[in-house]
């Protein structure tokens, strides 16, 4: 009997885990990272890149590098969320014959399920390399607000990737299980799960009911912003670096695609470093050149500066929290735990 894997198929990043005894183990991919960017790039020679390798060439190959495809899965082209994406995404979103939102890559049309399957294949391979045996079964998480079509499309993506999807479970429920909230004291309780992901934010109010000693999870309400996440935080840092560099050197980096790719990576790195330290150096030699020769970028950034830059983004998460609490019909004082994902 092979092992069943658990996959978090995220908008920005995905990860895979397996139970070892009673403990879940998140598996590192071939690059040694616990998460894999949910990015797929289709090369001219037919090669498909998934994860970090796809991310590294994204800026120089924007039309054939697909990211945030989870926003399209199981959706119709005419839906307003899809129409909003058309303006934002560098790749081409088209209507399939059945009205679904598909993507055009290198002259071919492919479904969001096929793209997601490429990501799931990578997660499956990561697990197989670690376990040393074939994996055929999985549990996949989806946002609590996914409808039946989106859930079925996620299952279909699993099937295309060669996985028998045993169950689709809600992300906030999975988070509550991961925190061992099914093992805690007797009685009913209500919790809030605050999930600020790479590309999306959502908050869910969950009731954990004790039914004959078994814990039952019910999502009472969910709310959020499908266009707010860690990438917006990175963007604020990029804008700050561009403005500072322009002030110092008189050169606008926002028009330089190669410089932007490096800035994107540096911004994400600075954000992560400032979680643990009060200050970081953003150092990018030979970022650009003009008639006077090469230019180097070196900017110090403090945590206080980052907090000031992202203050309005944090504020944007508060209203969905208030709405979720109201929709669940509970008071703030009824919520016993808050899980930050």
Image (tube, helix red, strand yellow):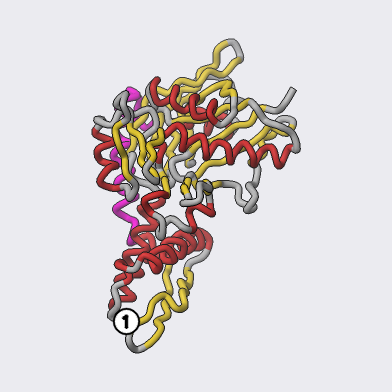
Q: In this view, does 268 lie above or below 107?
A: below
Task: Kindly give the residue lying farthest to the bottom in the view shown.
Answer: 292
**Between 320 and 229, the one nearer to me in the picture:** 229
Residue occupying image coordinates x 40% and y 31%:
204
**Between 178 and 254, the one nearer to me in the picture:** 254
Residue occupying image coordinates x 41% and y 77%:
297
The part of the image, by quadrant, that contains residue 183 is top right
- What range is drawn magenta here? 308-333
Circle 1 residues within 10 Å: few <14, some 14–19, many ≥20: few
- Residue 312 lies within the magenta run: yes
Name the residue that disc number 1 marks: 249
Q: In which quarter of the image is the N terminus?
A: top right
Most common secondary structure along the magenta stretch:
helix
Q: Is residue 307 above or below residue 339?
A: below
> Where is residue 182 shown, x and y percent of the image?
58, 25
**Is residue 157 visible to the viewer in this orientation of the structure?**
yes
Residue occupying image coordinates x 69% and y 34%:
23
**Between 105 and 230, the one nearer to me in the picture:** 105
């Amino acid at each position: 009997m092979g092992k069943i894997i658990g996959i978090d198929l995220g908008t920005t990043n995905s990860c895979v885990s397996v139970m070892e005894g009673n403990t879940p183990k998140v598996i590192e991919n071939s690059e040694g990272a616990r998460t894999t960017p949910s990015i797929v790039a289709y090369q001219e020679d037919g090669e498909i890149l998934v994860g970090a390798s796809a991310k590294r060439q994204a800026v120089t190959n924007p039309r054939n590098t697909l990211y945030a495809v989870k926003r399209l899965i199981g959706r119709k082209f005419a839906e307003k969320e899809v129409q909003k994406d058309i303006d934002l995404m560098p790749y081409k979103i088209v209507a399939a014959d059945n009205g679904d939102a598909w993507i055009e890559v290198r002259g071919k049309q492919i479904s969001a399920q096929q793209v997601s399957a490429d990501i799931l294949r990578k997660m499956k391979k990561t697990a197989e390399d670690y376990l040393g045996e074939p994996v055929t079964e999985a549990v996949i998480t989806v946002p609590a607000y996914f409808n039946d079509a989106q859930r079925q499309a996620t299952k279909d993506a699993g099937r295309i990737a060669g996985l028998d999807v045993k169950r689709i479970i809600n992300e906030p429920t999975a988070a509550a299980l991961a925190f061992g909230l099914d093992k805690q004291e007797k009685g009913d309780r209500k919790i809030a799960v605050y999930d600020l992901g790479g590309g999306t934010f959502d908050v869910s109010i969950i009731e954990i009911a004790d039914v004959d000693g078994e814990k039952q999870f019910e999502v009472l309400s969910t709310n959020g912003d499908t266009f707010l996440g860690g990438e917006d935080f990175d963007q604020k840092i990029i804008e700050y670096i561009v403005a500072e560099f322009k002030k110092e050197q008189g050169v606008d980096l926002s028009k330089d695609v190669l410089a932007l790719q490096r800035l994107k990576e540096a911004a994400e790195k600075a954000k992560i470093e400032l979680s643990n330290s009060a200050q970081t150096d953003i150092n990018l030699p030979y970022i650009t050149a003009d008639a006077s020769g090469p230019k180097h970028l070196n900017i110090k950034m403090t945590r206080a500066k980052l907090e000031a830059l992202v203050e309005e983004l944090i504020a944007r998460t508060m209203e969905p929290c208030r709405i979720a609490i109201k929709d669940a019909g509970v008071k703030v004082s009824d919520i016993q735990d808050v899980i930050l994902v």
